[in-house]
Image: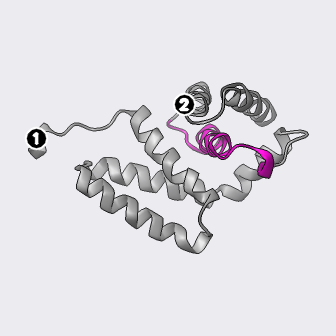
Amino acid sequence: MEVSDKKNMTRHKLRDKVFGLVFRIEFYPENELEDQIKCFEEFAEEEGYLPEDLEYITSKFRAVKEKLPEIDAAIDKAAVGWTRSRMGKAELSALRLGIYEMLYDDDIPQNVAMNEAVEIAKTYGDNTGGAFVNAILTKVRDESA
């Protein structure tokens, strides 16, 4: 494919790729996450990702990872009766990305962040994942208002 034929990914597709990296947090220790980013970057290069798309994905993942203690605290506060260890890994990862976008990414409206996180949970989680993520994000939104 010629460089001129390449198109930037949509925000939805970019978010899906960020979710894939956030999902890895549950499977790799902190000291191995940079290696996971390097693996993803190699894959992205082979797949012909545009440099600006790759930069967006990896920088957003690093931003989520940096805010993880605050994000997890918000989840713990909102998820009454649930512990993060009981949550599905896809739902937890969707929550982490959604909460990051809601609370720390001024470029994304809260309702968009919430809707996208719910859609990710519906796609990758179990059959109640979307409703679960929606309920938690609504509480986080209401508590942050």
In magenta segment, residue 96: yes
Image coordinates for residue 21, horizontal then vertical, percent: 50, 53
What separation in Å lies between label 1 and label 2 (alpha carbons)? 32 Å
Q: Which residues are magenta?
A: 84-107
Q: Secondary structure at mark 1?
A: helix
Give the residue at mark 1: 4
Do the numbered discs 1 and 2 sit on residues whose CB atoms are within 8 Å? no
Q: Main secondary structure of the magenta part?
A: helix
Image coordinates for residue 51, horizontal then vertical, percent: 27, 53
Image coordinates for residue 53, horizontal then vertical, percent: 33, 47
Q: Give the quadrant of residue 120.
A: top right
Image coordinates for residue 109, horizontal then vertical, percent: 56, 29
User: Residue at 49% of width from left, 48% of height from top?
Assistant: 20
Give the residue at mark 2: 123
Q: Nearer the viewer, residue 51 or 105?
A: 51
Relative horizontal placement of residue 66, taking residue 52 as reference (left or right): right
Q: What amino acid type is highlighted by mark number 2?
A: Thr
Q: Give the quadrant of residue 5.
A: top left
Q: Quadrant of the N terminus?
A: top left
Q: Quadrant of the C terminus?
A: top right
